[in-house]
Image: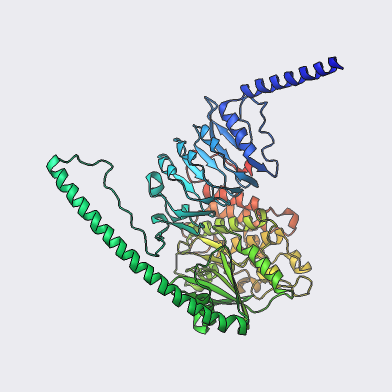
Amino acid sequence: MQMGIAVWLFKQVLAATLFSICCLALTQDGTTLLEMKSAFNDTKNFLSNWRETDDTPCKWIGISCHPNDQRVTSIALHENSLHGLIPNEISNCSELRALYLRANYLQGGIPSEIGNLSYLTILDLSSNSLKGAIPSSLGRLTRLRSLNLSTNFFSGEIPDFGSLSAFGTNSFIGNLDLCGRQVHKPCRTSFGFPVVLPHAESDEAAVPSKRSSRYMKGLLIGAISAMGLAFVMLLTFSWIRFLSKKERTAKRYTEVKKQVEPEAGAKLITFHGDLPYPSFEIIEKLESLDEEDVVGSGGFGTVYKMVMNDCVAFAVKRIERSREGSDQVFERELEILGSIKHINLVNLRGYCRLPTSKLLIYDYLSNGSLDDYLHERGDDDATLNWSARLKIALGAARGLAYLHHDCCPKIIHRDIKSSNILLDENLEPRVSDFGLARLLVDEDAHVTTVVAGTFGYLAPEFLQSGRATEKSDVYSFGVLLLELVTGKRPNDPCFVQKGLNVVGWSNTLIRENQLEGIVDRRCADADAEAVEAILDVAATCTAANPDERPFMKQVLQLLEQEVLSPCPSDFSESHSDYS
């Protein structure tokens, strides 16, 4: 018995010794990456080949190293369903040049230690669930040339320090609670007025003489006293004004609540604090919408522009038909849609049920829809040149891929078309109306998501079965690509006369090698090679057999290779193997 225990103990000691030898053989960067792996919940087992028995991490998936010294230079873990926190130990990979963690489910904040990665050139943490303040230590990254923190839940003022001052809105968009110069949104004090912070011209101050020092000291004491008195007076005035305003607001809210809720049955739901206005003001604005505020209409209802008292505008969709079911289920599913945040998706901010209608409140995008830009403007309008159309195609693909592959449960759009691609002031695309088709249309009925104006986008199998799938969305996106290339609607009269739609028409011209007849003449900057590549992507998307179509994640990779590959980069290696 004792001999057996001794043998068992010997084996345990031997195993521990061998394990420690293996771990000692691994480089310091490899040990750091293993600590990073332990901090993540790798739901898809993506990091399975990160093993402590290896002597180097350079062959691990998602890792690139310098060929000479085997130091880790790039960590690329895009879209791999990783959960957990970003560990502080990541700063131990001191030679790191690029950190890609986009589109996972990472939580917590950004470790301030990342500011110690002095060689870091690219930092992409977008489309996660990160929150908290952006650490000012990132400003120490003097070599940083690409920063993407968009579509998270960061809050507070963006530090205007060092390299952080060089990045604009696109690096931070989609974080509703961020403020600062970079996002053109002033931060406000508890009294409601913008914060004005002193800015020193230099970190060094001249050394004054003794006489001037006494003089300056006296001035300083006087100034401080005056400022203190002014501050006390301002505080008193603001407090009185605050109380008065609070009383008025409470009284007005009570009146509106009495008028709207008990008698009329109005109900307002805002998602995640996205509508920072009193309920009475929102309901008052919604009730006052009329024909003069109409900006469009679609298969699910009329769209209005609602302008708040501070001149901020929102789009309001009045739902004119809905699926049978309880309001509780409807509202719970709407809340799921309201939780989806992505830079290329229109943000659903709230829902209001009035006695006569149901209203959805969205971000208002000033440039309207892609349909308006492509088909309602004159032929001489060259705003949507080839470069702009590529950007729109890429952004729309990112939004749709996010719905298919990163939402749980996944969301099939069912109504992809140019009128559901909205454009902001920079012509950045936002996919709208996602989730509404399933939410508002009874799938058990014979009437499905076939709505007026969308037949040209519908996949053949959808027309037969009435059932939407990921691949039917891919087909619709392929039609959208052809619409961008040709500048024509899917059911343009010139196609219909020949018994075709844009898919059949473009396939005919491609077979006849007449590419010049396909491209919209407003795309003077298009080159034949790029057009051919986009048409190839569209052709695979619109294959008659849905099994032959790629998934949206693959479509996105093809477009990224085409649109982004001409841009020179120190880190130009393809990351498609990492997804």
Q: Position of residue 399 (x, y in %)?
A: 59, 58
Q: What's the coloring here? A: rainbow
Q: How many marks?
A: 0
- Asked whether residue 294 is in view, the answer is no
- Of the 4 image quadrants, the one containing the C terminus is top right
Q: Is residue 110 above or below residue 353?
A: above
In which quadrant will I find the N terminus? top right
Which residue, as the protein is rendered here, is positioned at the far right? 1
Q: Is residue 470 above or below residue 207?
A: below
Most foreground residue, 388 or 151:
151
Which percent across, then down, holds residue 144?
44, 42
| Residue with the most extreme top position | 3
In the rendered image, residue 290, in percent from the top left (x then y), is placed at 52, 83
* Residue at (34, 64) in percent of width and height: 235
Q: Is residue 400 above or below residue 456?
A: above
The structure residue drawn at horizontal position 77% and vertical position 19%, both measured from the top left corner, is 9
Q: Is residue 16 left or right of residue 244?
A: right
Residue 268, located in which quarter of the rendered image? bottom right
Residue 526 in view, yes or no: yes
Q: Viewed as shown, does residue 511 lie left or right of 394?
A: right
Tell me which residue sits at (64%, 65%) in the image: 335
Residue 226 location, quadrant: bottom left
- Give the x, y percent position of residue 113: 49, 38
Front one among 206 and 348:
206
Towards the viewer: 115 or 469:
115
Looking at the image, which is closer to me, 366 or 476? Answer: 366
